[in-house]
Amino acid sequence: MQENDLKYMQEALKEAQKAYAEDEVPIGAVIECGGRIIARAYNYTERLNDATAHAEMQAITMATSFLGGKYLDKCTIYVTVEPCPMCAAALAWSQIKRIVYGTPDEKRGYSKFTPSLLHPKTEVTSGVLQQECSAIVKEFFKSKRG
């Protein structure tokens, strides 16, 4: 784990908390490049009525817009939950340098299907603030079940 992983994952958790407050599945993401956050996002699937509006997808769009190009090969995404196959493939197309996620997604995480979805040069770190990242998702779905 790198020195700043905790700091940036805490920022991703803040995004997840915003999602929770808006009754979205509480997954947050930030993209760091050159020591600064260039994108912040959380799930917008309910608000936009769009199954593809995951936190990672929103963050990729913001980051590429900020940089003025489609490649994120000098950037790291911090996301509270392991990306799904759709998001992993989008991250591969963006050539993201590094993915850091908090908690695995046992049912729909990309690694359960095919880890080769990622760009070959992408580094992956998992388990950063895993308990906190897992707890917010569990709490959200527990509240939905009553």
Image (spheres, rainbow, N blue to C red):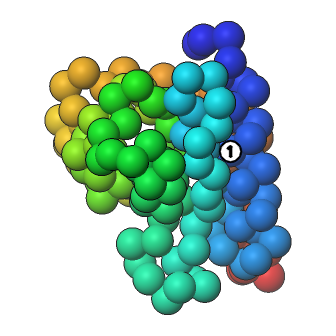
Q: Identify the image quadrant of residue 10.
A: top right
Q: Position of residue 57 (x, y in %)?
A: 43, 59
Q: Nearer the viewer, residue 141 or 28?
A: 28
Q: Position of residue 107 (x, y in %)?
A: 41, 56
Q: Identify the image quadrant of residue 93.
A: top left
Q: Position of residue 146 (x, y in %)?
A: 79, 82
Can residue 130 be seen here? no
Residue 107 vertical placement versus 43 (above, below): above
Three-letter amino acid code at the position of disc 1: Ala
Could you tell whether 97 is left or right of 34 in the image? left
Which residue is found at the position 24% from the left and 21% from the top? Answer: 121
Residue 101 vertical placement versus 128 (above, below): below
Q: Nearer the viewer, residue 40 or 119?
A: 40
Q: Nearer the viewer, residue 39 or 105?
A: 39
Could you tell whether 114 is left or right of 82 in the image? left
Could you tell whether 131 is left or right of 100 in the image? right
Which residue is found at the position 39% from the left and 48% from the top? Answer: 68
* Residue at the farthest front position: 68
Residue on which disc 1 sits:
12
Residue 119 vertical placement versus 143 (above, below): above
User: In which quadrant will I find the N terminus?
Assistant: top right
At numbered mark 1, what does the secondary structure look like: helix, strand or loop? helix
Which residue is found at the position 57% from the left and 74% from the top? Answer: 44
Can residue 18 be seen here? yes
